[in-house]
Amino acid sequence: MIVRTMQAAAESGRKIVAPTGEWDSTRLLLKDDGMGFSFHITTIYKGADFRMHYQNHLESVYCISGRGEVETLDDGKVYPIEPGTIYILDQHDRHILRAFEEMKMACVFNPPLNGKEVHNAEGAYELDAEPID
């Protein structure tokens, strides 16, 4: 059994802050935990507005708190995000995430992240990122 707190995860180097300053992510479960997926609690800061395109991963995102929207770039549809909303990027969807308020999100990635991933120039995570020590 794995038991881990947000505080312990952050203190062990599992909290990653985006170089752009738009988000931080505490990675509670990573590839080396052997579950086949990773689980993160991510904070998207108020005013964030950024493109992502997870070419190497599928992601499910559940909004715990805050408000914003996600726009799918291939069809231009905009979906509101509020507490209780889940959006699932099951087609490697190119998208824009906007935060009207600070949002707390629970995120699941498949395949799992190694730990130190931040978005590359195309808004994706690399598969060969460095693991947490």
Image: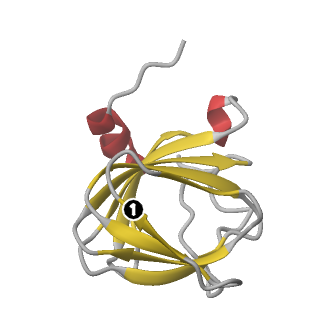
Residue denoted by label 1:
81
User: Which amino acid type is marked by label 1?
Assistant: Ile
Q: Between 108 and 98, which is closer to the camera in this rendering?
A: 98
- Above or below: residue 102 compared with residue 13: below
| Quadrant hosting residue 30 | top right
- Give the answer, above or below, for where 106 lies relative to 50: above
Q: How many marks?
A: 1
Query: Which residue occupies 68% across, 29% down?
Result: 35
Relative to 33, is 17 on the left or the right? left
- Relative image position of residue 38 (x, y in whole percent): 60, 42
Q: Residue at x 72, y 59 (%)?
A: 57
- 102 in relation to 124, above or below: above
**x and y, in percent, of residue 113 in the image:** 63, 51
* Nearer to the camera, 85 or 60: 85
Q: Is residue 77 left or right of residue 23?
A: right
Q: Give the quarter of the image for residue 98.
A: bottom left
Crowding near the residue tagged with mark 1, few <14, some 14–19, many ≥20 C-alpha atoms within 10 Å: many
Q: How is the image coloured?
A: secondary structure
Q: Nearer the viewer, residue 53 or 10?
A: 53
Residue 18 pos. (x, y %): 40, 72
**Residue placed farthest to the top in the image?**
1
Provide the secondary structure element on which disc 1 rests: strand
Residue at image point 34% right, 69% down: 68
